Image (cartoon, rainbow, N blue to C red):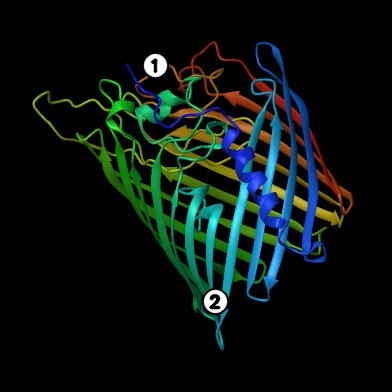
Amino acid sequence: MKQKTHSFPAGRSAIFLFILCFLFSGAFTVSALDWGLNINNTTGFQYDDEASLVQEDIASVWLSHSFNENTDFRTQGSYTYTPDIPLLVDLDLLRLRYTIPHENSDSQITAGRFAFTEFTRYVLAHRLDGLRYRFIGQSLSAYAAAGYAGLNLKPNSTIILSAADDGDQGDPDIYLGPPRIIANTGLNFRELFLRQDLNVALIGQFDLRPDDDLDAGQGRTHTAYLGTGINGPLVDDLYWSGFGYFGSGMMNNETVLLGFLAGGGLNWFIEREFNSRLSFSGVYSSGDKDAPGIYSYDSSDPNTEIYTSMNFLPISESTLGVIYSPRLANIFFGRAAFSMKPWDFFQGEVSYLAFFRSAPAGIAGAPAVVPVDPTDNESLYLGSEADLRLNFRPLSDLGIAVAYGLFIPGTGDTGAIRDDSPLVHKATVNLSLKF
């Protein structure tokens, strides 16, 4: 029987850690301690075959303190309510940062719980517990970091890299995310040539799941990623970016992963017309037509012990549309958007996204209401989405965000979605208050 070796009641550890932060802050003088309260309420509906309520309420408390001009501390804890999980208390941030000034540069050492990212945020953008060193120079920045993912509460973890990770999502007795060590390092060369910036990143993640946590047919997944990207101006007001990642790894001790992720975009800033921006972007993540699912494979030769899969597996998930945000594995999407900010307190954006499979195989992370047709071995088109976002900030401490999305599934002879899948509408209003 599967043992739950990395689970305990949700919120208990977060409450304990946040109490420690309050006790720790008691050592500070009241005048040196900053604190505040944030409240976010999101209310809306989603309609496909039937209407359903969208409700999320978050109350968070933050504390910050500067010991001196080189050392600062910040922490944040939150309570989240949703109809599915009415009680979720978590430690969002616990960061101690020390800055070492140099003549023309700075170095920073950061420890605790904070966000780990790479330059595109498509491969890694997740909160981890760990350590980071960063060098910030005039023309060169560099960082090296390592963190542990297994202390994140499962509802706040988007790391899914194996069948065991995927299976944990539906297990009510598991409260924490998968136990993985993630290391990343990167370089940023500013205006290296022709005002273009060059980024280089190397990332690795290592599965620490114990044998007792693996069911029959499951195994560990270790991956590594090497990426580079260039971005900068083409002419005045017109900027571009391009990037690529090569991913490799081993799944279940019998599948070699050799995939890639590539993308880019154009941004045209039209400040004279209501501070407008017109943008086009796209991302391609390789897939494997012989893989029935993202976390499984199918070798055409039964005598082959090692199978090579072209699936690219990002570490964390990305938010793409208001409704449709599949994991960037075996996915290709294009996006066009137009935004404007005619006043300081208002910004609006309309966007259109088109989604495709990179190969006629399974995908992950898409809404269950619009499933891929398992009998379709040819079609790549998944569907299109039109989104509208309006942001109001009438006061510095009050924000209102309105979002509406319409997803049109790709059905019929040219689409890969099951023919009985409905149109999906989603509308939300978010109210944020700061005290």
Residue 70 sits in which quadrant? bottom right
For marks 2 and 1 on the same chain, the one whose residue lies earlier in the sequence = 2
Query: What residue do we see at 29% from left, 39% from top?
Result: 310
Q: Where 370 sits versus 177, above or below?
A: above
Which residue type does callout 2 highlight? Arg
Query: Which residue occupies the foreground of this view, 235 or 347?
Result: 347
Residue 362 lies in what quarter of the image?
A: top left
Number of disc labels: 2
The answer to which of 270 and 227 lies nearer the viewer is 227
Determine whether, in the image, residue 380 is placed left or right of residue 430: left
Residue drawn at x 34%, y 20% as measured from the top left = 2
Answer left or right for 299 relative to 128: left
Q: Check disc 2 and report the residue beneath it.
A: 195
Badge 1 element:
loop
Residue at x-position 59% and y-position 61%: 96
Q: Is residue 249 above or below residue 172?
A: below
Q: How far apart are marks 2 and 1 (CA)?
A: 48 Å
Mark on residue 374?
1
